[in-house]
Image (cartoon, rainbow, N blue to C red):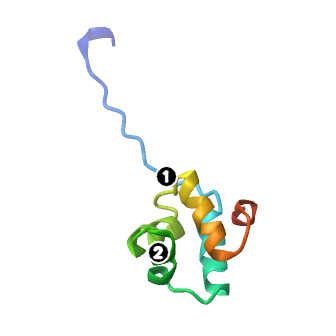
């Protein structure tokens, strides 16, 4: 940068919604399962499921496959 000045750029972190979390919440509710019950079935803590549903984090592909199996759906149903 000319003159030796440094510039700081602040970038806002924004969640990019894939719709996965909303679909997961809907499918879990339709199955009549709590986050804790579903988490126990697939080996994930309820807090992780809550983060998936809120779109804070996204699960790995193996977790998506376990979720689909536990809910009796296909991975495409999360779209």
Give the side of residue 72 with respect to residue 57, left or right: right
Quarter of the image where the C terminus is located: bottom right
Give the side of residue 14 with respect to residue 27, left or right: left
Above or below for 79 versus 24 = above
Give the side of residue 67 with respect to residue 56, left or right: right
Among the 4 quarters of the image, the one containing residue 7:
top left
Residue nearest the observer in this picture, 3 or 60: 60
Q: Are marks 1 and 2 in contact (CB under 8 Å)?
A: no
Which residue is the site of mark 2? Answer: 39
Query: Residue 65: percent from the left, percent from the top?
Result: 62, 60
Among the 4 quarters of the image, the one containing residue 6:
top left
Give the side of residue 13 with respect to residue 76, left or right: left
Quick one: label 1, few (<14), some, or many (20+) residues within 10 Å?
few
Residue nearest the observer in this picture, 49 or 18: 49
Query: Residue 13: percent from the left, percent from the top?
Result: 44, 49
Mark 1 → mark 2, Cα distance in angstroms: 26 Å
Query: Residue 30: percent from the left, percent from the top?
Result: 67, 86
Quarter of the image where the N terminus is located: top left
Q: Measuring 64% from the left and 57% from the top, which residue is drawn there?
A: 18
Which residue is the site of mark 1? Answer: 14
Q: Earlier in the sequence, mark 1 or mark 2?
A: 1
Among the 4 quarters of the image, the one containing residue 2:
top left
């Amino acid at each position: 940068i000319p003159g030796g000045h440094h510039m700081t750029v602040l970038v806002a972190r924004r969640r990019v919604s894939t719709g996965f979390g909303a679909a997961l919440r809907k499918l879990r509710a339709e199955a009549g399962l709590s986050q804790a019950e579903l988490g126990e079935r697939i080996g994930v803590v309820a807090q992780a499921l809550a983060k998936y549903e809120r779109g804070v984090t996204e699960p790995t592909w193996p977790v998506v496959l376990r979720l689909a199996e536990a809910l009796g759906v296909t991975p495409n149903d999360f779209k």
